[in-house]
Image (spheres, rainbow, N blue to C red):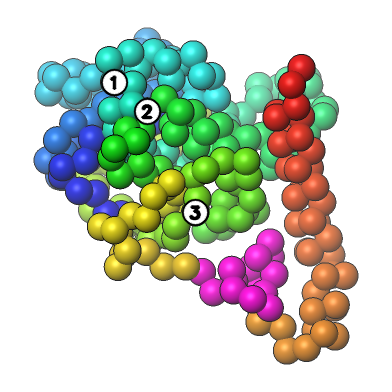
Amino acid sequence: MYLNPQWRILTVGDGDLSFSDAVHNHFSIQKLVASTFDSKETIQQKYQHNALNALEQKKITVLNDFDVTNKQCWQRLSSHLHRFDLVIFQFPLIPAFVGKEAFELNTRQTSMNVLNRALLHQFLKYAREYALDPLGEMLCYITSKDVKPYREWNIEGSLNTHLNMQYKGQMPFEISQFSGYKIRNVDRDKHVKDTSGITYVFSEKEPALLKQKLTMPEYLNHNHCTLCRVGPFVGEEDKAKHFNAKKHLKMSALEQDWEQWLTHFYTPS
């Protein structure tokens, strides 16, 4: 992950705040604001080792109870509105629903796949509307694992539909750059195995400083299936065989569910 010390950075959804603390400790960032979905009390109760006090002692602003899907939370940025160059969301995942009844209630009309995509879509939308400085770099980073179910969210494909924030490429996430950072389980005091991560980059602008650091996946090229990340096809028969395969039909169904969510979200009530 490339971070410029001159950038003004906002982190969101930083569970135990260890990522924000590592960014501050190792990159000498000009301005850093951290935020968490949990309340201050929940962080202290959930994570035995957290960086809340460390950040407060360093005079780093920490915003708690910050829900990236709620634009009112973004409006809470107050004096920080439109003052950031980069907003970072590390390994996003919606919290698990407690109990079968809660799970069935929340997935009755959609899937967990769509709910996670919706989380990231609203992150891009509201970061652009409330956090990013139009005169700055206008960057959003989403770091995610390159395994199921995360790779089924089509982050580099249709995630940004209806948004001006365009996918610009990706770079590997090396956790060794961030000493002290623990990738936490979203619901409890456990840290997750350091699976290889990818940082996906979005911006309205051409990120000149990042140009040499970003790569574009081969599966986004012509004659590939971007949903399934396969190709190139050796002929029409090969292509047709793939499009009729169980894996592709599943991915297509997920994409249709996502399109339905987008239609509902952008249809005036």
Q: Amino acid at mark 2?
A: Ala
Q: Residues within 10 Å of mark 1 (few under 14, many from 20)?
A: some
Residue 113 locus on image (x, y percent): 69, 42
Q: From the viewer's perspective, tell me whether residue 48 is left or right of residue 92.
A: left
CB under 8 Å between discs 1 and 3: no
Q: Is residue 230 visible?
A: yes
> How many angstroms separate mark 1 from mark 3 (CA)?
25 Å
The amino acid on which the numbered mark 1 sits, given as a three-letter code, is His
The residue to which callout 1 is attached is 80
Whole-percent x and y of residue 38? 44, 18
In the rendered view, does 113 fall on the left or right side of 210?
A: right
Where residue 222 sits in the image (x, y, percent)? 64, 76
The tag earlier along the polypeptide, 1 or 3, is 1
Q: Quadrant of residue 210?
A: bottom left
Q: Is residue 224 magenta?
A: yes
Disc 2 + disc 1, Cβ < 8 Å:
yes
Quarter occupied by the N terminus: bottom left
Examine the rendering and report whether any part of residue 183 can be seen.
Answer: no
Residue 131, disc: 2
Which amino acid, by three-letter code, is at mark 3? Answer: Tyr
Residue on which disc 3 sits: 167
